[in-house]
Image (cartoon, rainbow, N blue to C red):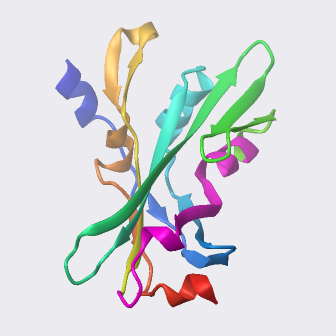
């Protein structure tokens, strides 16, 4: 039954909007937004009150060696509370809980990555070129009402959305 259920999921091709990065103090700060990442069925899971986490990874990669010089992982979690008719979105990077009655506003907080400190001067070497790679993924969740574990990545056609910046060096942070 599990594989039959998964074959009936119509997924979307989630992707990131443009990526912006700039220096802030002694850090490289990044902003981007995950778009096209909800299906009506996926939204129903959220509206049923099931907590759902979107995991985000920020990697500073040497494009020549393909080695990751630094990695930062965060998550955003959404949950709908029926009694309050309110959504909460928790953002792990700043440990803030946003509360709203608007599903659209909650989805904005869930998918927007604003001024995330991707790395500091200490995390990268001078005179080496890097690229910033941002990716997202979902994990499996157990839904009690149907007594099944569901791999939420099927709603994204099992593809992790990624975006990559242009190359930069240590100098971008020290400007």
Asked if residue 171 is positioned above or below residue 4 in the image, the reply reads: below
Quarter occupied by the C terminus:
bottom right
Question: Magenta stretch containing residue 118, yes or no?
Answer: yes
Asked if residue 11 is positioned above or below residue 20 in the image, the reply reads: above
Q: Residue at x 39, y 79 (%)?
A: 125
Q: Residue at x 51, y 31 (%)?
A: 52
Q: Which residues are magenta?
A: 105-128
Quarter occupied by the N terminus:
top left
Q: Residue at x 44, y 68 (%)?
A: 123
Number of marks in the image?
0
Asked if residue 168 is positioned above or below residue 27 in the image, the reply reads: below
Q: Which quadrant would residue 46 be assigned to in this image?
A: top right
Give x and y (percent) for residue 13: 39, 58
Give x and y (percent) for residue 48: 58, 20
Q: Could you say which is closer to the camera, residue 94 or residue 43? A: 94
Give x and y (percent) for residue 7: 23, 35
Q: Could you say which is closer to the camera, residue 135 or residue 125? A: 125
Q: Residue at x 58, y 82 (%)?
A: 173
Q: Which quadrant would residue 6 be assigned to in this image?
A: top left
Q: Is residue 27 left or right of residue 119?
A: right
Q: Could you say which is closer to the camera, residue 92 or residue 152? A: 92
Q: Could you say which is closer to the camera, residue 110 or residue 36? A: 110
Asked if residue 89 is positioned above or below residue 134 in the image, the reply reads: above
Question: Magenta stretch containing residue 96, yes or no?
Answer: no
Give x and y (percent) for residue 74: 51, 46
């Amino acid at each position: 039954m599990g594989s039959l259920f998964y074959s009936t999921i119509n997924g979307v091709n989630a992707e990131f909007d443009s990526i912006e990065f700039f220096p802030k103090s002694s850090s490289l700060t990044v902003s981007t937004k995950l778009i096209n990442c909800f299906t009506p069925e996926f939204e129903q899971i959220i509206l049923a009150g099931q907590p759902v986490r979107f995991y985000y990874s920020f990697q500073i990669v040497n494009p020549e060696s393909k080695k990751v010089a630094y990695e930062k992982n965060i998550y955003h979690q959404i949950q709908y509370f029926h009694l309050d008719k309110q959504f909460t979105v928790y953002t792990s990077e700043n440990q803030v809980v946003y509360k709203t009655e608007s599903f659209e506003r909650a989805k904005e907080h869930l998918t927007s990555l604003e001024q995330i400190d991707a790395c500091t001067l200490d995390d990268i070497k001078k005179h080496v070129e890097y690229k910033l790679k941002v990716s997202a993924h979902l994990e499996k969740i157990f839904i009690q009402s149907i007594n099944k574990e569901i791999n939420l990545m099927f709603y994204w056609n099992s593809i992790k959305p990624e975006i990559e910046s242009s190359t930069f060096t240590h100098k971008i942070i020290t400007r």
